[in-house]
Image (cartoon, rainbow, N blue to C red):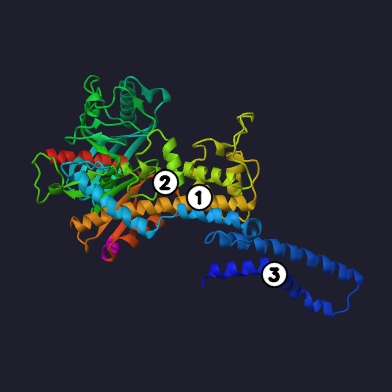
Amino acid sequence: MGKNERICIVGKALTLTPKLVAIVPFFPFFPFFLCPLSSAHASLLLLTFLFAFLSLFFHLFSFLGIICSSDCLFSSPFLHVMLTSQQKDILSQVEQQLTATPQQLETIIDGFIHEMKAGLSPSGSNDMKMIPSYVTGHPTGYEQGTYLALEISGIDIYVCQVILKGNKGKLAINQYQYKIPDDYTTGTDVMVLINYVTDCIVDFQQRVGIPPEEEMLMCISVGFAIRQNSLSQGIILGLEHGFGFTNAIGRDIVDLFPFKERGMGLKIVAVANDTVCTLLAHAYQHPTTRIGIVHGAGTNCSYYDRVSNVHGLDGRYDDEKDEMIINTEWCSAGSKYLPVSAYDAQLDAASNNEGIHLFEKMTTGMYLGELVRLVLVDLSKQDVLSFSAHHDPSDDPDDACLLAVPYRFDTSYMYVIEADDSDQLEDTRVILEEMCHVEGTSLADRFIVKKVCSWVGNRAAALLGASIASVVTYMTNEEIVKKDDEFAIAISGDVYEDFPNFHPRVCTTVRSLIDEQVATRLSVGLVQYSRIIGASIVAMLSNRIFD
């Protein structure tokens, strides 16, 4: 019997037989009752005893409730007393919906491997696009040179000068961040955005002392879908994360930049997906890296594959030796292999891209908070929670309950709630009552909300772990990586980095689903500044390829 199990049993005993509780505080005082006391002494002793009894009672029950809540939903004495059997049944059903079983994870692995092979085949009719990056070769950590890199990530622009020093991956960076004004994110002409980005690049060059006319190689890292027929080309397939320009689709992003017209010496030699850059940033310091993953507002994965497995390349590669990084676009994986719950279906039906990107909707920062909100609204309607998540149109908009408003329960709230270990779950109360304007919450409410966040987060980690395991299994089955080879996975993204315990949950899932021998040789690394550094590595590799 584990420690927390023992605590759960003690908690139940204290709840069911309160007389036993009274024995504990009486025992230390018992010898004093054997001695004759004056009435004053007796009164003082009685007051001391009452204070000690009350203090012990409340602290003990609160402590037991907090400890037990981490492992079993109904182990808290408060929840045993305050929840009806019907409420417990409803919560158990919700937990079951939001739990990925081992069989479901195995289904994901088989399905994703099928999708990968189908995407690489001549037909290419599948959910995963499996887009060739045209990046071949592996960095060694000894390359040298100075390169410029540009990253467009959501509403942020990062311009960076990267100095590769060699010597096992040493480097230096000068980086500056710019915000894209709202007026430059949508419209009829994408050149509004491109001209602003160019202005940012010129400003950066002035800040670090690079003459605008100086010749430098540059790589662009983008987070939206592009199609490439070469390393220095990027046809825009779709704009995401708030961007929308009617004339952008089908345009080559390289040709859009007016560097020559403005007398600038920059040459864009490569366009790379952000996961490609994540992989290469880690590989410069850890040359055994073979997989790169971004898991934040969205999710995607790139990995090394044999050129011989990739259909449609032009024959300039050595099929026997060359390996190329493939962008899976696994965010597009649909519901064929995923354990879609009623809440997932509800979120998908209300989205602006119904029926696609189901994997992204079940695992990423763009949607996890909304999934939690939908569960809480449902539990409120079924009276499992004591507070109302209903929005009354007559309410003051500034005081209206934000749980009734789609996407107003931010995913970052889950990070705070999961990390809240205070006796009264005070941080959780602040999130619900002060941030979301819930009228009032009980301790039982806060326990339940914490559990819902845990269920949604655990499932997201399990699904991500299964998807990683599918890529690892594919690579070992195809002998791209031998079972006794050391190899590394690079991961970046705010969900992966900031969500408490997300990293160990993912790693535990991956290791439980892959070959045991492979698991002992596998490492997973979190990557800082990954994309912008990786873009400079792509520029370096492109120069080597062209040479």
Badge count:
3
N-terminal label among 2 and 3:
3
Along the horizontal axis of the image, is 57 left or right of 504?
Answer: right
Q: Position of residue 150 (x, y in %)?
A: 30, 34
Q: Decide which of 265, 155 is in the foreground and name it.
A: 155
Q: Position of residue 126 (x, y in %)?
A: 25, 42
Q: Mark 3 = which residue? A: 17
User: Answer yes or no: do the residues labelled 1 and 3 have beta carbons within 8 Å?
Assistant: no
CA separation in Å, label 1 and label 3: 32 Å
Q: Residue at x 12, y 38 (%)?
A: 546
Q: Residue at x 27, y 52 (%)?
A: 471
Along the horizontal axis of the image, is 66 left or right of 246?
Answer: right
**On the image, which quarter does residue 472 sit in?**
bottom left
Which of pointers 2 and 3 indicates the residue nearer the eye?
Answer: 3
Q: Mark 1 = which residue? A: 453
* The residue stretch that appears in magenta: 517-521
Q: Residue at x 55, y 49 (%)?
A: 449
Kind of element beneath mark 2: helix
Q: Mark 2 = which residue? A: 495
Q: Amino acid at mark 2?
A: Val
Dot 3 surroundings within 10 Å: few (below 14), some, or many (20 or more)?
few
Which image quarter is the C terminus in? top left
Which of pointers 1 and 3 indicates the residue nearer the eye?
Answer: 3
Q: Amino acid at mark 3?
A: Thr
N-terminal label among 1 and 3:
3
Q: Amino acid at mark 1?
A: Cys
Which of pointers 2 and 1 indicates the residue nearer the eye?
Answer: 1
